[in-house]
Amino acid sequence: MTVIPLISVVLPCHNAVGRVSDTLQALSLQTAAPGSFEVLVIDNNSKDSKALKDLVATLNERTGNFLFFTEPKPGLNEVRQAGAEYASAPFVLYLDDDAVPLCSYVERMAYAVAQYSPDVIGGSLLPFPMVAIGRQFDHTFAGWWSLRHYGPRDRWLNPGEYFLGSNIGARRSILQNHGFDRTKDRKGSALLGGGELWLGNSRLRRWYCASAPVFHKVSEERMSAEYLTRRMLANLSKDRAVASWSDVARAFACAVYSPLKTAFIQIHFRLGLALSVITSKLKARRLPL
């Protein structure tokens, strides 16, 4: 008798052998029973496709729930949509090839799906720095590194809140009926994204599973000015050439405004704290012995 799993985990990969081993190992060590979920590794025109297939085959010998597919059409959202078609479970979770889940990830997600019956589910994306993060970076860079955190408690998302594609899931039927937005697709080295943002529609029941975070790798490259510039311009011009000087001005504003605002708030707070300490000392001197 064939047992249909509750969860299908889809892992799109592109030239990923050098970075995906942590993700695959974490998925092979899940506390959930192997028969309760499946892992679909889908390669997208990679140079290392053969090596990835061999790696998946090795893990499958141990767990029996890893499957390997290829998607010839270039694009992250093409792979995601193919995953929804290949999946046999009623609920599909998506990870990126540089995102590492906890070993209890599938178990926590499966429990939330069974308990709350959401249309969409997701969790935090926390930083997994591959090198030391420089002092020039603060929380304002979280979005450029695809990080997201909605607090320590499980809850329904509020209007305007949404999950990112490195830790998101949905009913397979919804994914099949709607599909991912190919106009916001990441292909090869292009940095355009957002094809999953329609899953943030407030008409969908969206459950935040705080106990199922994923650690998103922040490489040295992602801390470079060249990468951050490309990422900002991709959001502004859909990864094409910058159309005008106004695009440059908008990119500059995005790069400078938030850090300057944060620095001003920090300076204001520290000056206020220093003034409070000085005032307290002066008052203490005027008190009678």
Image (cartoon, rainbow, N blue to C red):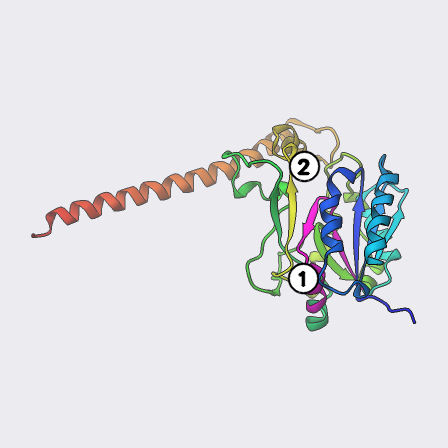
Place residue 225 in its image quadrant: top right
- Residue wearing tag 2: 236
Residue 88, can we see it? Answer: yes
Rendered location of residue 266, percent (x, y):
41, 41
Question: CB atoms at circles 2 and 1 under 8 Å apart?
Answer: no
Q: In the figure, is residue 70 to the left or right of 125?
A: right
Q: Is residue 286 above or below residue 263?
A: below
Q: Is residue 176 above or below residue 19?
A: below
Dot 2: element? helix
Q: Nearer the viewer, residue 191 or 7?
A: 7
Precedes in sequence: disc 2 or disc 1: 1
Place residue 122 in its image quadrant: bottom right
Magenta stretch holds residue 95: yes
Place residue 120 in its image quadrant: bottom right
Callout 2 crowding tier (Cα within 10 Å): few <14, some 14–19, many ≥20? some
Callout 1 crowding tier (Cα within 10 Å): few <14, some 14–19, many ≥20? some
Magenta segment:
91-111
Rendered location of residue 281, percent (x, y):
19, 45
Give the CA distance from mark 2 to mark 1. Answer: 25 Å
At a point 58% along the width and 53% down the height, the residue shown is 149
- Residue wearing tag 1: 202
At a point 81% along the width and 57% down the height, the residue shown is 63
Magenta stretch holds residue 184: no
Q: Nearer the viewer, residue 138 or 178?
A: 138
